Image: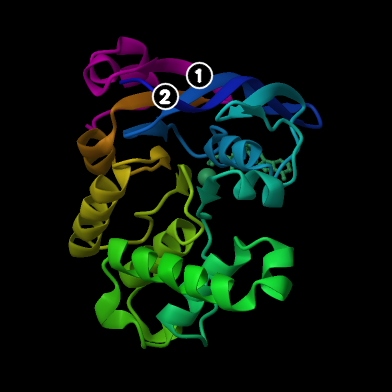
Amino acid sequence: MREVLLSAVGLTKRFGGLAAVNDVSIDLLRNHIHAVIGPNGAGKSTLTNLLSGDLPLTSGTVTLGDLDVTGWSPDKISGQGLGRSYQKTNIFLPFTVWENIRLAAQSREPFAAQWFKRAASFSSINTRAERALELAGLQHRRSSIAGTISHGEQRQLEIAMTLATEPQVVLLDEPLAGMGAVEAERMVELLKSIKKNHGILLVEHDMDAVFTLADRLTVMVNGQVIASGTPAEIRADAGVQAAYLGEEHS
Ligand SMILES: Nc1ncnc2c1ncn2[C@@H]1O[C@H](COP(=O)(O)OP(=O)(O)O)[C@@H](O)[C@H]1O
Ligand SMILES: [Mg+2]
């Protein structure tokens, strides 16, 4: 069953004379991981920022579920079921793992609920946070200070914080960055497990992970999509081989 959770059409972002993202269209489906790959400066992070509302579009439209969210603020888009992690970490290092996840869960609660439905919202926040802690496999780190856990666990914590907002769509910008082989393996397993029920956009340089995880791939170079298709189609694409998937990545 093909259920489109997010549909972006003709996205363009100009910084002065530079088209960092140039007429890019992408669909994210439930239970699918859509990877976006390409060399540094291709426009992958900018694309992520356009989808999340962190950057305003020059042109194009973004539809989330059946709502046109083009031009909405990041907060409103997040409230509509889009969660994201950042290329740079967003964690409060002096707080515990649990506190970080709980704060993220709380950020999802409507303002009014915090004042008028204190008790009820308290339990729903804890439930959401608990689910996210488990899904990310961090139960054993619940009481650890975030600044003291490993780099890989911090990235897992980031994912848990994203999941605590109960998103339908999850945007991940280089979740494996800076990881050793063991940590990367654990993250790949985590991403496999959260694929269920979510639509995931995965920006990632680790080609082993990308080809293990992705159901579809989009290849960007200089702001433009040069190829889009299944992993097998992308592997076989001569243009992609030439532009990006050289010996170093194969
Ligand atoms: N805020 C910005 N202002 C001006 N140029 C930017 C800005 N953000 C990104 N760029 C430029 O847009 C291009 C795409 O960047 P980015 O989306 O970060 O690429 P990637 O994530 O694929 O490495 C690069 O040339 C970068 O220098
Ligand atoms: Mg980037």
Q: Is residue 235 left or right of residue 49?
A: left
Q: Is residue 202 above or below residue 176?
A: above
Q: Is residue 119 above or below residue 238?
A: below
Residue 169 lies, in percent from the top left, at 47, 41
Residue 52 lies, in percent from the top left, at 62, 42
Residue 229 lies, in percent from the top left, at 34, 16
The residue depicted at 71 percent of the width and 72 percent of the height is 116
Dot 1 crowding, Cα within 10 Å, few <14, some 14–19, many 20+:
many
Q: 165 or 191: which is nearer to us?
A: 165
Q: Is residue 219 above or below residue 160?
A: above
Q: Is residue 248 visible?
A: no
Quarter of the figure that contains the C terminus: top left
- Checking the image for residue 225, the label placed there is 1
Give the labeled residue for mark 2.
218
Q: Are marks 2 and 1 in contact (CB under 8 Å)?
A: yes
- Checking the image for residue 81, the label placed there is none
Residue 47 lies, in percent from the top left, at 58, 35
